[in-house]
């Protein structure tokens, strides 16, 4: 039923999809109807091809040809598609093969420059854009001569709950996922904090996204040793980096965690509890931690294990805001039940959670952008004017542009040189920058 109403409705919705879809639909109509609605569509085409500054020049030389085909007495649909294809290729030619910059439109990851990838965020922008995919290493950019608590680290919530991870139990998994990259990819992209849920399961220690303190075939992701070996591989290959593990710990096997960390070859990197400050003092210098090869910090949610296994009880050393939906209320940064108040300065570290109770990937690109930055400021005020050392998010690479990487850069800028971006700190001494 190709009447005026249906075509107009299609035109309205197709502006939010793609010009190819609209042209395919339009090509089914009579010559007269096609020609009439082409006039409606031309402004959209012009807007589509010239929306990016570095593509404007590409469209102009061919625009008159496009018009002549539509207006000419011998209209040819095939010719129209040919010209449209040429326009599309030429318009994109100025930004492809790794030349696209942050926020540029793209068609694939290969179009984007280093440290970027091509993402669709339908709640924020039309089509695909290049957004950040890697973080900034403050140790290398600025220095590693400050205490550990003077840096900020991007942290992945349920880092092990990876989309597409095959079942290791033979039973289809029925539990939410929170990340898209494997552990090695997360670390290589700049993540330095990993939240892991540890359970007794099937005679070993497993990582599970479960409930009630019990792991099941349908909530299990993989044996913990597999993930820990990936971490060992990263620490071995990157001798100046530090990784922090925050365990939601349901392991009841005596010394179960100690054994799996030993079997994974991680004890040689272990940062001892004895060196962790409990009175709000500064942590050891990062440079000293690196020199001593004590580059793995592990926290557990079980208080007794600090004494029995030498694994630090998390809330003896950090304050943490509420996780889930309760931690995403605008203008409010309450502490989670296990943590002391956010303004408790006897704890040297600050952890800010910013993720939904139910992880929804399509929303992550918006949540990990401006809203995240706003919450960091809110929690800064709640934590007695202290910036977060860890920010935990779902789907860490998804954003409107800079996302969680930009948020981490902002935190490190404030912590290292009182600037709004860590890149402003390069070559400076701590405190020499004016807040931007």
Image: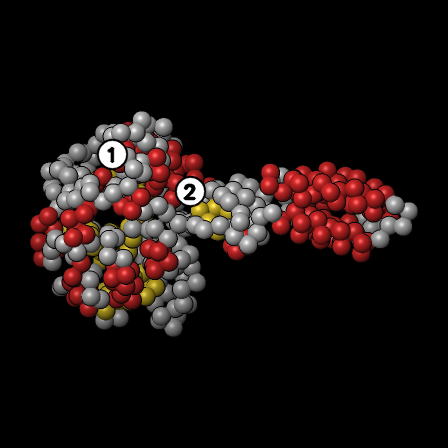
Residue 343: where, in percent of width, then height? 21, 32
Where disc 1 sits, the SS reads loop
Q: For the view shown, which residue lies furthest in the bottom direction? A: 170
| Residue 385 vs residue 342, the one in the foreground | 385
Q: Residue at x 77, y 49 (%)?
A: 26
| Residue 365 vs residue 209, the one in the foreground | 365
Image vertical order of residue 325 relative to residue 80, above or below = above
Q: Residue at x 17, y 56 (%)?
A: 293
Give the Cα separation between the discs numbered 1 and 2. Answer: 27 Å
- Colour scheme in use: secondary structure
| Residue 104 vs residue 161, the one in the foreground | 104
Image vertical order of residue 65 relative to residue 230, above or below = above
Residue placed under numbered mark 2 in the picture: 403
* Nearer-N-terminus badge (1/2): 2
Residue 334: where, in percent of width, then height? 28, 35
Residue placed under numbered mark 1 in the picture: 429
Residue 161: where, in percent of width, then height? 36, 58
Residue 264 visible in image: yes
Of the two numbered discs 1 and 2 in the rendering, the one whose residue sits closer to the viewer: 1
**Where, by quadrant of the figure, is residue 160 drawn?**
bottom left
Q: Residue at x 43, y 50 (%)?
A: 115
Q: For the view shown, which residue lies furthest in the front direction? A: 427
Quarter the C terminus occupies: top left
Image vertical order of residue 401 relative to residue 202, above or below = above
**Where, by quadrant of the figure, is residue 6 drawn?**
top right
342 with respect to 32 (left or right)? left
Residue 3 visible in image: no
Q: For the view shown, which residue lies furthest in the right direction? A: 73
Mark 1: few/some/many CA within 10 Å (<14, 14-19, 20+): few
| Residue 200 vs residue 139, the one in the foreground | 139
Q: Residue at x 88, y 45 (%)?
A: 72
């Amino acid at each position: 039923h190709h009447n005026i109403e249906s075509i107009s409705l299609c035109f309205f919705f197709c502006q939010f999809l793609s010009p190819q879809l609209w042209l395919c639909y339009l090509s089914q109509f009579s010559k007269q109807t096609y020609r009439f609605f082409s006039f409606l569509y031309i402004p959209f085409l012009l807007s589509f091809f010239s929306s990016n500054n570095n593509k404007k020049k590409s469209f102009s030389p061919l625009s008159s040809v496009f018009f002549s085909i539509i207006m000419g007495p011998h209209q040819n649909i095939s010719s129209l598609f040919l010209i449209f294809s040429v326009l599309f290729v030429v318009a994109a030619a100025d930004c492809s093969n790794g030349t696209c910059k942050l926020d540029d439109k793209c068609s694939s990851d290969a179009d984007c420059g280093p440290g970027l990838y091509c993402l669709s965020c339908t709640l924020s922008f039309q089509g695909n854009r290049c957004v950040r995919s890697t973080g900034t290493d403050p140790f290398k950019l600025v220095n590693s001569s400050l205490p550990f608590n003077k840096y900020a680290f991007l942290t992945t919530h349920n880092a092990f709950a990876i989309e597409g991870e095959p079942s290791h139990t033979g039973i289809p998994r029925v539990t939410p996922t929170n990340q898209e990259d494997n552990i090695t990819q997360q670390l290589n992209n700049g993540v330095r904090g990993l939240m892991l849920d540890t359970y007794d399961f099937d005679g070993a220690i497993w990582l599970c996204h479960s409930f009630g303190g019990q792991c099941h075939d349908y909530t299990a992701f993989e044996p913990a040793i597999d993930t820990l070996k990936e971490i060992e591989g990263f620490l071995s290959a990157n001798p100046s980096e530090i990784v922090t593990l925050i365990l939601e710990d349901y392991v009841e096997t005596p010394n179960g965690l100690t054994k799996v960390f030993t079997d994974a070859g991680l004890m040689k990197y272990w940062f001892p509890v004895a060196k962790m400050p409990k009175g709000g003092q500064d942590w050891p210098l990062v440079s000293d931690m690196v020199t001593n090869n004590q580059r793995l910090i592990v926290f557990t949610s079980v208080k007794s294990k600090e004494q029995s296994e030498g694994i630090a009880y998390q809330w003896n050393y950090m304050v943490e805001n509420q996780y889930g939906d309760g931690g995403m209320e605008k203008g409010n940064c309450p502490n989670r039940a296990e943590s002391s108040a956010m303004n408790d300065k006897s704890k040297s570290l600050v952890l800010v959670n910013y993720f939904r109770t139910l992880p929804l990937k399509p929303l992550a690109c918006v949540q990990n952008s401006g809203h995240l930055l706003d919450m960091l400021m809110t929690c800064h005020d709640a934590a007695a004017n202290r910036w977060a050392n860890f920010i935990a998010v779902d789907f860490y690479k998804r954003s409107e542009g800079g996302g969680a990487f930009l948020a981490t850069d902002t935190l490190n800028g404030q912590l290292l040189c009182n600037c709004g971006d860590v890149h402003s700190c390069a070559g400076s001494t701590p405190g020499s920058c004016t807040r931007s």
